[in-house]
Amino acid sequence: MTISGARFMPGIELSEVLYEEAVRPLLEEAFPGLRYAAARVGSGSEVLGFDTPRSADHEWGPRLEIFLTAADHARHGADIRRILAERLPKEVRGWPTHFQESDDPLDPVGRMRLTDGPVNHRVDVYDVHGWLAERLGPAAAEAGLIAREWLAMPQQRLAETTGGAVFRDALGTLTAVRNRLEWYPEQVWRYLLACQWQRVSQEEAFVGRCAEVGDDIGSAVVAARLVRDVMRLCLLLERRYAPYGKWLGSAFSRLPVAESLTPALRGVLTATDYATREAHLCDVYESVAAQQNASGLIAPVDPKPRPYHARPFLVLHAERFAQALARTVTDPELRTLPLVGSVDQWADNTDLLQQPHAIQAATHAIG
C-alpha cells in the first residue's frame, strides 16, 4: 500500500504532532512518572530545515528521538520500542508511521507504508551520553571539551545535534549538551577562521596559473573549490555550522551576506574565460575580507586584491588574514598546531566523517 492524499508539512512539525498526539499519551499511560526528553534531532534534512516534498521518498516522516537516563534506557528501552510498535496509530496527519525497509543492499532505506500489523516505527530510544558518543565521540557529552576534541567533530554532526527541536526535556541533559555545543569556544573559532583563510590562500593563485597554460577546465575547477571555501568561510564568520555538500548552498543562502555576494559567486562559476573569472573572484575576496574586518576579531587588513608576487594574477593573499587571526589565538594547545583546522577542513569524505574514532585518531596525530 502507498501513501495518497497526505498534505506535506515540515518534518519538524510532523514530529511534534507525532509526539503530542501519539507518543506522549502512550508513555504517560504505560510508564507513568518516567522522566525523558523527546526531540527531533540527528540525521534527516528536516532537522536542518531543508526538507521538501521530495524528502518523503525515504527516511522522512513521523520520526522522533526519546532520551532516557542510562539506567532507564537499560530497564525500559526495549519495552518502549515494543509498546510503540504495537500501539502507535497507523498514520499521523495522513503520513504512515510504519517504515518498510528495502531488501536492496544498494538502497537500504525505509519508506513509509501503511500496514495492518505492528508498526516498524522511527521512534528511536537512547540515553544522551550513548547517542552523543556514537555521533560525535565519547567526550561530546562532557563539559570542558579540549580544543582537539572540538576539532574532531564534523560540522554536519554538530549542526544535527544542535538543530531540530526539543519538545520535552524532563532530564535537562539533552538541552544542556545542545547549549554547550551550540558554537565553538572563541579560541577554537579564531583558529578555525585562520585555517579557512589559509585554505583560500593555498589555491587562489592556481586559477590564473591553470589558465596561463591553457587548462581552462583546471582553472574553473580550482575557482569552484574557492567558491566552496569562501561559502564555508562566510558560515564560520556568521557562527553557523556548515552542513555537508548537499545543503551547503541552502545554508549559505540564509546568511545576511548571501544576497550581495551570490551574483559574484555565480559569476565565478559561470565564467568561460579567465579574465571574467578573476574579476568575479576579486569582488568575492574584497567582500568577504570586508566582512572579516567588520567582525572586530582582528585589526583591519587591506581587503584589496593585488598581484601574486611577480606573476600577473590578481589574488587577495589570504594568508594575511590567516596570520592576523593566528596571532590572536592564545590557547597553548592551538598555538602549537599548524593551520590545518578541524576535520571538515582537511577531509570531506562522507563515510570517514561518520567514524568518530577514526577522526579522533587522525586529529590527535596532527601537530
Image (cartoon, helix red, strand yellow):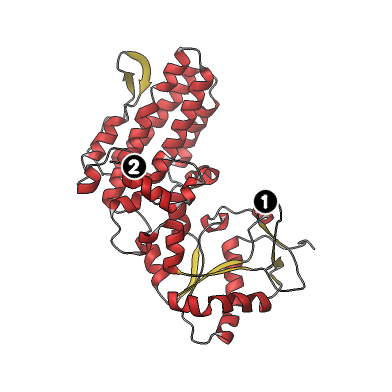
Q: Residue at x 33, y 53 (%)?
A: 149
Whole-number angstrom distance, CA of label 1 to CA of label 2 = 36 Å
Badge number at residue 148: none
Q: Quadrant of the C terminus?
A: top left
Mark 2 nearby-residue class (10 Å; few <14, some 14–19, many ≥20): many
Residue type at mark 2: give it: Gly
- Give above or below for 184 relative to 279: below
Query: Which residue shows up at 19% across the image and 48% down it?
Result: 332
Label total for image: 2
Q: Is residue 305 above or below residue 134?
A: above
Q: Nearer the viewer, mark 1 or mark 2?
A: 1
Q: Residue 288, located in which quarter of the rendered image?
A: top left
Q: Position of residue 312 (x, y in %)?
A: 37, 14
SS state under label 1: loop
Query: In this figure, which residue is indicated by the disc labeled 1?
Result: 105
How far across and how far down the image is residue 102, in percent? 70, 56
Residue lying furthest right: 1
Identify the amino acid type marked 1. Pro
Q: Is residue 90 left or right of residue 333?
A: right
The local crowd at label 1, few if under 14, some if 14 to 19, many if 20 or more residues have their Cα within 10 Å, is: few
Q: Which quadrant holds the N terminus?
A: bottom right
Closer to the chain start, of discs 1 and 2, is: 1
Residue 192 horizontal side relative to residue 135, left or right: left
Q: Nearer the viewer, residue 254 or 166?
A: 166
Q: Is residue 20 visible?
A: no
Left of 238 or right of it: where is 271?
Answer: right
Q: Is 281 drawn above or below residue 343 in the view shown?
A: above
* Residue beneath the point at 47% across and 31% down: 225
**Is residue 232 visible in this depiction of the protein?**
yes
Residue matched to label 2 = 341
